[in-house]
Structure formats: structure tokens, C-alpha cells
Image (cartoon, rainbow, N blue to C red):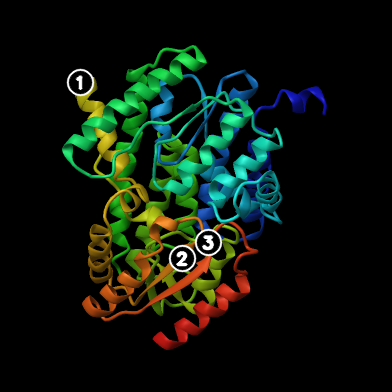
Amino acid sequence: MNSNIANNKIIPYEMVLKSIRSTGELVERILPNGELDALRIGSKYIGNAVRDAVEKAKEGWPIIGHHFAFQREYLYCFDCVPVCVEGTSYLLSALLPDGIERYYDLMANWGHPFHTCSSQKGVMGMTLDNLFQFDAIITPTAPCDNTYASYPFFESKNIPLILPDLPFLHEEKSYKYYAEQIKLSLERLGEIIGQKPDYERMRNHIKYENETYKVQMELLELRKATPCPVENLFNAISAGIAVFASGTQDKLKFYQEYLEIAKKRYKRKQSYGIDEKIRSIWPYMLIFFDLSLCEFLDRELGMTILFDIFNYNFSEPVDVSSDLDSLFYDMARRGMNMPMMKESTDFYYSFIENCVNMAKDYSADCYVFTSHVGCKQFGSVPQILREALREECGIPMLMIDLDVGDKRFTSMKIIKDKLSIFAKTLL
């Protein structure tokens, strides 16, 4: 191993940067305007965020791994490079020709159970292979036991692990408790990396998220239109933007630029791809190992994905004008109500109620539930949701058992066949 590689603490980010740059160039050079707009804009801003991280890592800034449930913008109280474990795993599974199966297998050979979540296993395998060299990792004790049981692996590599405790109930006392946990965790992280938290700087990064929230709400409202003016691929790209660029101008600009595109389609009553025939909601995750599925649905089946779990559930903005105690309370409330956190740390009643209401509000024709092998906390929910949608809305739900980050569990051919047959029953 040469000295440049030995001193590179985030080699997978170099892989992301190279892949996202190539993707952006292909889109710009080959496709006409109006095609893959979400990818065109997203590759630019994800690329900006990753490039910035690589440069700061080379300057010696500490590398802080974090679960997506611990908001990236909170870590900007330090001079550090935040690396989202789950986001890195799944973006590389989408960008690389063979995904990151090699790193899943490394963890399996190491002794980690195959049925745990691939969103952690990818970066765990990369760390085992010394491609990541974290200075510390921070993750809440949620959204699931499967996640929480995987993170202690990093301690085997002598990486300090900080675990803010996240309560189950969504009540005022819970938000107060988790607010204290966030603050204590940031202070502990500061001790490890030798920095004092700058909470005023953190406020400024949270302001970007508050501004982005307004644009997200406007986009959600546009999706009620028939046809939906937002392409399916947007859902996947926006998830990438969230984990690589939250708390920055890049995320805000991405949403602002895409909103203008969606508005133009809305005014023309124009859908993306072929004419919209089926309006679907995916209440859980998209399939990350092959994002071409989004184009297949848009162009072959005329099936719109109105949104998935990372694109419909947004908590209220954080009040950045208040004192520190109130600030952290709002941060805790927002964190506990982020996508997947809300659904996985609360009883399922609210999730079922939200899904029924969304089906009505967005004129959905069906639901598609991706039952991810790693999400055992959700194993009993699909059947209850299917019955509720049938009884309350009169619409069906397709369930697909898979691993959203590993194509070897359920192949894309099987997934497309299931969706094609399901679509025929709706037309």
C-alpha cells in the first residue's frame, strides 16, 4: 500500500466521487434536457458534498461516522468530516457495477450474521478492509435492534462508539430526555476529537434545513397533482442528498432547482416518461442496488412512485432563535420524527393511519411494500397495512421480500416481473 492510500482515511468517498463524476458527465453529454433531471442535479450537489469531505479529510480533519438517524447538521458544531454509514453503503451499491457485495461477504466471513441490515454491513466491511479509518462513530439506539446490534463491530477496530439513548414513546418527557442525550453525546464526541462544540455554528447549519423544509413541503403538495410532476428517480436522489449534504446550501439548492422543474411539468399537466397509468406509494424503502427500476416503472409501466419513506415524513423545523435547552428539545423532537425513526420507534397505529390518509390525499391506486430482510422490527406490519388499505381505501398492496442493497437476495428480474404482473391487475 503506497503512502497516499495509507494516509487516505475515506477511500470509499474517493470511489463515490469518481463514480458520481462519471455519472454526471454521462447525463450531461448524452441525454437531452428533460431526461433524468433529478440525477443531473443530484450528481452535481452530491459531488460537491463528497469533494468537500475528501479535501477536508486530506487536511487532517477527524472522520466521524454516523447513523442517518443522527442528523448530519448537528455534527457541524465541529471541524470534522461526517460520514453517513448507511448512505455510503447504499450509494455505492447503486453506483458500482457489482455493488458492494464483496464487503457484505467480508462481514459474513468475519462472522457477522447474513440477515442483518446491508446498510451497515457495507461500511463495516470497508472498515474491516481498512478503507475507512474513523476517529469516532455516533449512532442513537434506534431505529431498530438490528442496527443497534451491528454498530458495536466498530469497537473491534478500536473506534470509539458514542450511543445517545433514544426512547420509545413519543412524548414530551421523551423529547426532553433525548435532547439531553444529544447534548451529552456531542460533548463526549468533542472530548474524543479534542474540540469544543460550537453550537452557534450548528444553528446556522440547521437554518439551511429549515429553509429546505419549506421547499420539501411545496414539492409534496405538487405530487397531489395528476399526473405527478416528479419522476421516480427523484426519491432515490433526494435520499442521497439528505445523507451527504444535509445542513448545507447544496441540499437547499438541489430542492430549489428541482422544484422549478416540477412546477413547469405541473403547469403543462405533464408526467415524466410515458403517461401516468398507476399512482403508487412505497411506504418503506426504494430498491438501491439498481436504480434503473425507477426508469422502468416510469417508462415501461407508467407507474409513478409518489414517494417512499424518505420522501414523505418530515418533522417540523427547529426553532433556532431559542436558548440552548429549547434548541436541543426541538432537535430531539425532529430527530425522533425523522423518516424511519418515527415508524420504527413508535407503535404501528400512527404508521397505518398515516398510510391510509396519504392514499386518500394523493389519490393512490396501490401501495408497494419492500420488506427488507434487515428490518425485522417491521415484519408484522405489511399484512396489517394491506388489510387497512383494502378496507379503508379499496386499494391493493404488493409486498416484495428482498434486501434493498444486495441483488443476490431477490434479483431485479424477479422484482420487475412481480411489479409487471401486479400492474396488469390494476389496469
Q: Which residue was labeled with disc 2? A: 370
Q: Residues within 10 Å of mark 3 (few under 14, many from 20)?
A: many
Q: Amino acid at mark 1?
A: Asp
Query: Closer to the observer: label 3 or label 2?
Result: 2
SS at mark 2? strand
- Label annotation for residue 20: none
Task: Where is residue 89? Give x, y as percent.
Answer: 58, 46
* Mark 3 and mark 2 residues within 8 Å of each other at the beta carbon: yes
Query: Closer to the observer: label 1 or label 2?
Result: 2
Report the Cα–Cα distance between label 3 and label 2. 8 Å
Tell me the quarter of the image containing the C terminus. bottom left
Residue drawn at x 32%, y 39% is 335
Quarter of the figure with residue 355: bottom left
The one of 290 and 68 positioned closer to us in this rendering: 68
Q: Which residue was labeled with disc 3? A: 287
Q: Earlier in the sequence, mark 3 or mark 2?
A: 3
Report the Cα–Cα distance between label 1 and label 2. 41 Å
Q: Earlier in the sequence, mark 3 or mark 1?
A: 3
Task: Where is residue 354? Give x, y as percent.
Answer: 25, 61
Tell me the quarter of the image containing the N terminus. top right
Residue drawn at x 59%, y 75% is 414
Q: Which residue was labeled with disc 1? A: 323
- Residue farthest right in this picture: 2
Q: Residues within 10 Å of mark 2 (few under 14, many from 20)?
A: many
**Drawn side of residue 62 relative to residue 308, left or right:** right
Quarter of the figure with residue 128: top right
The one of 361 and 369 positioned closer to us in this rendering: 369
Q: Is residue 248 visible?
A: no
SS at mark 3? loop
Task: Where is residue 306? Give x, y as percent.
Answer: 37, 65
Q: Is residue 199 visible?
A: yes
